[in-house]
Amino acid sequence: MFVTISGTPYFGYLTWGDWVTSTWLDLITLTWGDVVGPYGSKVLANSNPIVRDIVEDRSTADFSILDISHAYDFQKGQYVEIMDTNLDTIFTGFIDTATQRRVTPNGVIEHKLSCVDNHYLCDKRLMAKAFVAPDTIADAVTWIITNILSAEGVTAGTITAPTAIEAISYDYVTVASVLDDLAAYAGCTWYIDVNKQLYFVPRSTYAAAWDITEAGDVLSNVLAESFEVYETNPEYRNQQFIRGGQAKTSLQTEIKVGDGETSSWPVGFKIAEVPTVTVSTDGGKSWSAAKSMGIKGVDTGKDWYWSANDQVILQDAGGTRLADGYLLKIEYYGLYQVILSSADFIEVLDRQAIEYTTSGLNDAVRDDPLITTQDAGLNEANALLDHYAEIGTKVTYSTVVPGLEAGTLQHITSAIHNLDDDFLITQVEKCPMYFEDQDLGNALVMYNIQAVSGPVEDYWTKVFLKLNQGNIGSSIANSTSVVLILKTFSGIATGDIWDYIVADGSDDMDDSEFPSYEIGDEIKYVSMWNGGSEVFRKYRVAQTGDADSGKFVTTFIINSGECNLTWDTLKLYGGDVASDSFGTGDVVYSVANAYTKNSLEALQMVFTITES
């Protein structure tokens, strides 16, 4: 094989044409002068550069160069091209690490060079961009090439990914990470070839040059004793958690009681937008007009002040304090962190059967602060489950038959190994192979192949890159940090909260004798009960669904400073008269749930209630 670095050629001893005309006696009597003469000090320490092509990851190349006159200083980022014995280009990329080793007393230097392929161009660039419908995954990939990678010399190869995008955004993350995400979401693979063309295609797009079959217990084109089969998927999961960013609550109403002194009033959530403040002097029978509202530290001369992402509303320093017994009503939209989960229940049942005495659940969590809605989070969770909720099969083998490339699909059939499936070739290692009695001009290249059926595993290069980028979090939490815990429930509503009755003039549709609810009043509060007594209740932060869908998904947040007690039952309350006072409203749903909460826990409770 031949190597070129920044345009300078480095050959493995003589050219193959020179070797062909030599005899073994000639080779034995060669001196350093004979070897180095035609090329100065430009020689490989051996003639066997190792090239590893890896799908969806950095392909690598490793080789050493002898520096007889210690004249070279190789640097990270220098461009490298490697050709095989037929002078076909099999690797292009960049030096990643360069190590010098003194090998003789008179100063001969061995430069050990490790290189990464053109995926390096995606690792070194960041992007900030959002994509929304009607964009497709292909549109997003094309945008990345046009607006970012074109400056690195990358052009578009085949881009085939019509998967629709609902909403997805990236906030200064590497282009490689974005392409990984898009590929997982669309069920595709991506790579940049030796000509700097980026391909983004379904994994079934390109067939391998040849398949493996079994005849007479012998595998075709596979070197003896090299074939191995593994059942593996280090990233397997059948339940996916998504920890997202901040979402806006439904309208929150909090009532505060004056004492003649207090001027600052905390609320339950960080405030998302301008709140409304009104005052009642008659116990809540009537309310004043909305008070003027300004921004803390910016405005002056207002009755009250607020700040975005803050939980305290302040009264103006010159304002009259709320008298003892007067009521202050604060209406606002707050912010809460999105956390949700999705499970592949068929996979869970399969794991239960295989693991015998376990729940069958295999959990994974992903932090994505750009997720701000339940729907977007569920889409991401389901896409990850589609990709990773499968135990994969990996095979490795060696061959001297050329034509196999990473990213192509090879069908492998073997009755002995119980295989009959398409395998994605994920790694091709190429290295020359010589024999003592073989003409060096006809040297073979041995190909060490790795292929998988199922999810593609992360190789050491990608894991190392994730560690450098801080994408793998510590498993040890701060002992004083608050943990947000997701609790999900599903069930059938008590009563028909989907039946809306139009008033006939004599009664209001919200009157208690009607088994129906005004839109928005169906599910309002979650209530904790212990030993038959109500101990706490909290208003919802979000609700989706309607009468037509036959389902409501309602979210409640119990903050770390709230409800730090024990309960045995949860109840949902709805109806016009349901308020934050105990005993008000109609029970919509009830479920036994034993739990003791402490001040280092916050709960996000999501109830999926369907029509009875």
Image (cartoon, rainbow, N blue to C red):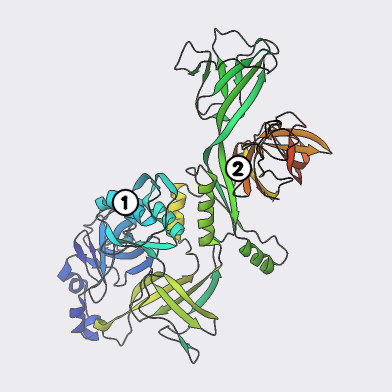
Based on the displayed image, in which of its 4 quarters is residue 110 positioned? bottom left
Number of numbered discs visible in the structure rendering: 2
Q: Which element carries disc 1, helix, strand or loop?
A: helix
For the residue pair 64 and 369, the one nearer the viewer reads as 369
The label on residue 264 is none
Q: In the image, what residue occupies the spot 62% across and 15% down?
A: 279
Relative to 164, does residue 214 appear above or below in the rendering? below
For the residue pair 185 and 191, the one nearer the viewer reads as 185
Based on the displayed image, in which of its 4 quarters is residue 430 positioned? bottom left
Residue wearing tag 1: 143
Between label 1 and label 2, give the one nearer the viewer: 1
Q: Is residue 416 left or right of residue 569?
A: left
Q: Residue furthest left?
A: 38
For the residue pair 85 and 402, the one nearer the viewer reads as 402
Residue 53 appears in the figure: yes
Residue wearing tag 2: 477
Q: Is residue 161 left or right of residue 276?
A: left
Provide residue 385's location: percent of width, then percent of height. Answer: 54, 59
Relative to 501, does residue 283 appear above or below in the rendering? above
Q: In the image, what residue occupies the spot 35% across and 81% down?
A: 401
Q: Amino acid at mark 2?
A: Ala
Q: Is residue 576 left or right of residue 123?
A: right
Relative to 504, does residue 326 appear above or below in the rendering? above
Relative to 207, does residue 368 appear above or below in the rendering? above
Report the Cα–Cα distance between label 1 and label 2. 39 Å
Q: In the image, what residue occupies the spot 50% across and 61% down?
A: 387
Q: Amino acid at mark 1?
A: Trp
Look at the image and tell me in which quarter the N terminus lies: bottom left
Provide residue 276's location: percent of width, then percent of height. Answer: 55, 22
Q: Residues within 10 Å of mark 1 (few under 14, many from 20)?
A: some
First of labels 1, 2 by sequence position: 1
